Image (spheres, rainbow, N blue to C red):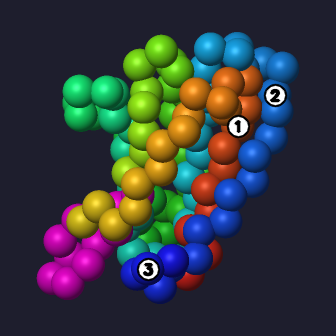
């Protein structure tokens, strides 16, 4: 990835998740602060999950696909400033699935 990170994605269908929703899970293998935040089409934040130090997850959020449009992946950069570094769209085709993002390297 452009900032040198390695983020693994495991995509799993789950019959307990309605086709109108997606479940996003964040786990981390590094100590630094990490976050995934979901946004709607107007750019408003819907929900977020974050890790920090020994609180590495998994942390989960369930998103309504009629509202959620994209995810922003953020991390602590210089001086610990929380900074969005990656954006992922295309959530509409992920209904009924669990998306587990594991931040492997920073």
Choose mark 1 or mark 3, whichever is in front.
3
Q: Foreground: 92 or 10?
A: 92
Position of residue 66 measured from the top left corner of the image (x, y, whole percent):
48, 15
Spatial CA span between label 1 and label 3: 25 Å
Choose mark 2 or mark 3, whichever is in front.
3
Left or right, 63 with respect to 47, comes to: right
Find out whether the residues at labels 1 and 3 contact each other: C-beta distance under 8 Å.
no
Q: Give the residue pinned by disc 3.
A: 2
Left or right, 48 with respect to 58, comes to: left
Question: Magenta part of the protein: which range?
Answer: 73-82
Q: Foreground: 84 or 35?
A: 84
Left or right, 44 with respect to 14, comes to: left
Determine the secondary structure under disc 2: loop
Whether 17 is drawn above or below 5: the answer is: above
Give the mark nearest the N terminus, 2 or 3: 3
Using the rendered view, name the quadrant where residue 49 is placed.
top left
Spatial CA span between label 2 and label 3: 31 Å
Find out whether the residues at labels 2 and 3 contact each other: C-beta distance under 8 Å.
no
Q: Give the residue pinned by disc 2.
A: 14
Residue 81: in sight, yes or no? yes
- Mark 3 Cα within 10 Å, few/some/many (few <14, many 20+)? few
Q: Give the residue pinned by disc 1.
A: 98
Residue at coordinates 75% horizontally, 53% vertically from top-left? 10
Whether 95 is drawn above or below 18: the answer is: below
Using the rendered view, name the quadrant where residue 71 is placed.
top left
Find out whether the residues at labels 2 and 1 contact each other: C-beta distance under 8 Å.
yes
């Amino acid at each position: 990835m452009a900032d040198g990170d390695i983020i693994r994605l495991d995509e799993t269908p789950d019959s307990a998740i309605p086709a109108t929703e997606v479940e996003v899970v964040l786990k981390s293998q590094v100590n630094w602060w990490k976050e995934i935040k979901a946004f709607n089409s107007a750019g408003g934040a819907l929900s977020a999950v974050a890790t920090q130090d020994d609180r590495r997850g998994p942390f989960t959020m369930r998103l309504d696909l009629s509202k959620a449009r994209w995810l922003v992946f953020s991390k602590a950069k210089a001086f610990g400033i929380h900074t969005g570094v990656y954006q992922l769209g295309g959530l509409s085709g992920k209904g009924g699935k669990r998306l587990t993002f594991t931040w492997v390297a920073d």
